Image (cartoon, rainbow, N blue to C red):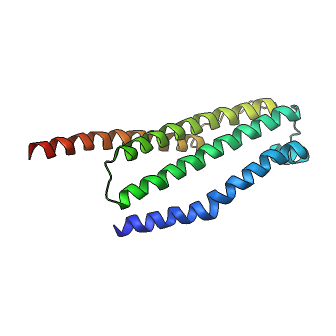
Amino acid sequence: MRKLNILKSLVDFVWIVTCIPLIGLLLFFSVFIFLDTEVIDFIFEVDDAPLDASMFSAQIFILLGVGLSFLGIYCFYLFRKTLRYFQRVKPFHIDVIDNFNRIGLLLTIIGISGAVLHFLAQLILTSQFKVYVGISPQIMITCLGLFFMVLSEVFKIAKAAKEENELTV
């Protein structure tokens, strides 16, 4: 129980210090890229390669990245909410299983969409065809999402076994 309290405290700290301010910063940044287009050149400047595409397509890529960031913040919120059920000693509650499945699905979407978005941004904005082979953050996020989906299935099986065990007593 002590480890759970430490985890919950750390997650709450990260939520307050990082996620809440990040929501405001992302909203401000989403509006600011339409007001000052010089920021876009600063963001997409890679190896002194100038931005070839129009500013509108760059703004669209940035907005899609901001949307993926909001999905990540929502996943962290769901994880925080799930830890509350663990503190109340309700690990097999239906909301825990649904939250794990939802977190997994969203993280998988974030990982795959992030990889596709990164590839398309390189292709369209800088006219460079680059394929990264190896461990990338997008692959790790996709793996984490699949892990949460498997965890959801394990908790679903454990809940069914627990209910069956209670009926036999």
Name which quarter of the figure residue 111 lies in.
Answer: top right
Q: Residue at x 32, y 44 (%)?
A: 155
x, y percent for residue 45:
84, 44
Q: Residue at x 68, y 53 (%)?
A: 23
Q: Residue at x 45, y 64 (%)?
A: 7
Question: Left or right of 77: which side holds 50?
Answer: right
Q: Is residue 64 visible?
A: yes
Quarter in which the N terminus is drawn: bottom left
Name which quarter of the figure residue 85 lies in.
Answer: bottom left
Question: Left or right of 152: which side holds 71?
Answer: right
x, y percent for residue 64:
71, 37
x, y percent for residue 30:
78, 45
Q: Residue at x 86, y 42 (%)?
A: 34
From this view, report whether residue 18 is shown above or below residue 146: below
Question: Left or right of 77: which side holds 90?
Answer: left
Q: Is residue 48 visible?
A: no
Question: Left or right of 83: which side holds 68?
Answer: right
Q: Please state the total of marks drawn on the protein image.
A: 0
